[in-house]
Amino acid sequence: MTLQPRDIALFFIVFGLIVATGFLQSWNVALGIFNMGLISAIMALGVNMQWGYAGLFNVGVMGFVALGGLGAVIVAMPPVNDAWAAGGLRVIAALIAGLGTIVGAVVLWRRMERGLRRTALLIALLVVGFFVFRALFDPAVEAIERVNPAATGYLGGLGLPVIIAWPVGAALAAGAAWVVGKTALGLRSDYLAIATLGIAEIIIAVMKNEDWLARGVKNVIGLPRPVPYEIDLQNDPGFVDRVTGWGFDPVTASSITVKLAYSGLFLGFLALLLWLTQSALNSPWGRMMRAIRDNEVAAEAMGKDVTGRHLQVFILGSAVCGLAGAMMTTLDGQLTPASYQPLRFTFLVWVMVIVGGSGNNFGAVLGGFLIWYLWVMVEPFGQTLIGFITAGMTDGFWLKEHLLDSAAHMRLLTMGLILILVLRFSPRGLIPER
């Protein structure tokens, strides 16, 4: 699949808008939009793999993105030694006991014949395992969360380079996708949507309430970065002399330099993912996935393992979303579970895929950049527009007050309007699947 001249023109228009923002407002703002556009494009690629390749309706994007952010904390943050001494090993023992109970219940259910004896033993195993788990887990968590709760109160991480956290975040999301997929992929698509939504809410609830894991709503701040800190550049005499000689302010130049470094990292990962997804789409595997998407009954009649292939692509797409979540947490420098809202991490990514063109990887990338640009810029544009419209109205006039109060909702209005227009005039997206 190659880009047509119209497709290239669309990319030029979107990147032109970002460049114009740099000239008219600030290069810091433009680069911030570009960096989050890169991450959004990666999220859109993950959802496009599930929906565009296989027709899987995943509305739990938020949960897989959050697991990627959790992976960044677990890998990159330094361990809290006092917390580990207080209850770290007991938490691990409790988790092993809980996992062992689940595995034992599954084995018992499969090995024993159906009957009252199997049911009684299964209930007994689950009850005993639950009490053993809670007896180990609760005191350990209480001891961990008492360790300097204002600054830590959690186990911390492994203290490894943050780049390693990105594939780990992808692996955590893939693991959750395997659990959901094994449960729901053999059912109708609406059941899959319910299952993914449910697991996403469970993940967010756990991250908000289990302080021992990642401080809950207290947030984890100060994540290590793969690029220099602005203050380090500002304290570097060589950097200061160089940018001053070019006529730039060292503070502004350091911020732009850091954002450019992030841009290079994210752009490299996006280019690699785009190459991999394009290669997969054009391979026999990709043609088989599209055949399954278009007619599952015919594909199954030809001997294809439909459920197994669905599970495969669901795991791959979720892993890509987890990778994007780890990258975003690294960019922000903090993990804030309360910020994982469905509006931003599910609805917005789906709009990116639909507007860009589901089934087309380049369309997903275009949608990621375009929708994120509009998401950031529409609100200030809307406030300016409403201010211009109401300039001639007298203060206190009900219509003026109503319009000014509604300016904050311009984002939602614009997203809905764009979605309606695209579905009406280009229902297959701006760069449709060919």
Image (cartoon, grey):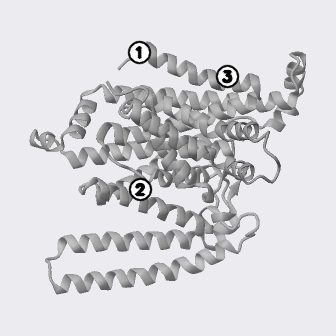
Q: Is residue 393 left or right of residue 170?
A: right
User: Which quarter of the picture shows residue 299?
Assistant: top left
> N-terminal of the two: label 2 or label 1?
1
Q: Is residue 45 visible to us here? A: no
Closer to the camera in the image, 360 or 308: 360
Does the CB distance between marks 3 and 2 fall below 8 Å?
no
x and y, in percent, of residue 75 in the image: 59, 51
> N-terminal of the two: label 3 or label 2?
3
Asked which secondary structure carries label 1, the reply is loop
Q: Residue at x 54, y 38 (%)?
A: 40
Q: Is residue 179 left or right of residue 84?
A: left
Residue reaching furthest to the left: 301
- The Cα atoms of the two marked residues, 3 and 2, are separated by 38 Å
x and y, in percent, of residue 367 in the image: 49, 33
Name the residue beneath numbered marker 2: 176
Task: Name the amino acid, label 3.
Answer: Val
Q: Is residue 230 visible to us here? A: yes
Closer to the camera in the image, 381 or 395: 395
Asked which secondary structure carries label 2, the reply is helix
